Image (spheres, helix red, strand yellow):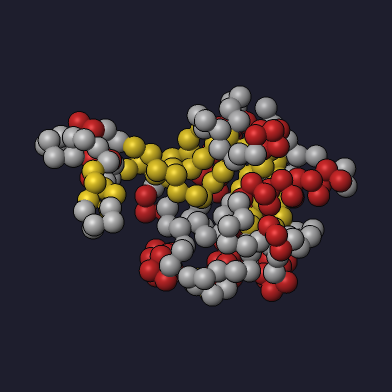
Amino acid sequence: MKRSILCIIPARCGSKGIIDKNIIDVCGKPLIAYSIESALKLQSENLIAKVIVSTDCEKIASVAKEYGADIPFLRPDELSHDKSKSIDFMIHALAYFDNIGEKYDTVLLLQPTSPIRSFYLLKQAIDTFNNSNNDSLISCYKEEYINDLVMYKIDSENTLKPMNKYHNKGVRRQDHGEVFVRNGSIYITKTDYLKNTGQIISDEPLLIEMKKSDSINIDTMEDLILLRNAICK
């Protein structure tokens, strides 16, 4: 089933770890440009219907327009602070288009801070979703070492508390099995599910698997250095 997909690329002004993070230079162009270019390629192939950047920032809006994204509105301040949830700006965007008579049955969320996505991978994610009845799809990488056998919490006395009671029983990593870790790169969700539940991810979402090395999510300067080393030539 071919769906009418709205791609939302979120980029608010405030970023404490890295100033102007969403438009910081990465290999000669702003970080957000990578997600915009990927989305526009999908649009040119008629895989999605529209590409917008949801931002509260004139500066980011100007940069996004330079790279071909649509900026139909500036996001309200109450949806743009540190504690704002992604679902809120997604519902806001859908309400805006509902009010002007544009209907989309699916939303593709591409966070600019997770920019390593090939066109093939994005197409595969959309095709997988279109050929299912699931309410959502997320991207993950396979983790074969880190799991709750090697995870601990810490108490007020600086003592480690194991998350798995078998942490010291000599259970082999191979016997514990692999896990899949959400990497924040690709989210696809049915519009009705978003509106009805206030959630982006369903209880049993579809998987699009990515490489761990492609799952860099920019939050700190160390992450930015890793990204530049990975993609700058």
Q: Residue at x 40, y 43 (%)?
A: 181
Name the residue nearer the viewer: 19 or 77. 77
Q: Is residue 30 visible?
A: no
Left or right? Give the position of 213 relative to 59. left
Determine the image quadrant of residue 102.
top right
Picture coordinates of residue 206, whole percent (x, y) = 51, 32
Name the residue nearer the viewer: 159 or 212. 159
Q: Is residue 85 visible?
A: yes
- The residue at the far right in this view is 100
Q: Quadrant of the N terminus?
A: top right
Q: Is residue 35 above or below residue 171?
A: below
- The residue at the far top in this view is 133
Q: Residue at x 65, y 39 (%)?
A: 198
Q: Residue at x 64, y 46 (%)?
A: 87
Picture coordinates of residue 203, whole percent (x, y) = 52, 30
Q: Is residue 226 above or below residue 127?
A: below
Q: Residue at x 28, y 56 (%)?
A: 156
Left or right? Give the position of 7 relative to 114. right
Q: Quadrant of the C terminus?
A: bottom left
Left or right? Give the position of 51 relative to 224. right
Q: Is residue 173 above or below residue 133?
A: below
Name the residue nearer the viewer: 75 or 27. 75
Picture coordinates of residue 25, whole percent (x, y) = 53, 74
Name the residue nearer the viewer: 122 or 204. 204
Picture coordinates of residue 107, whole percent (x, y) = 67, 42
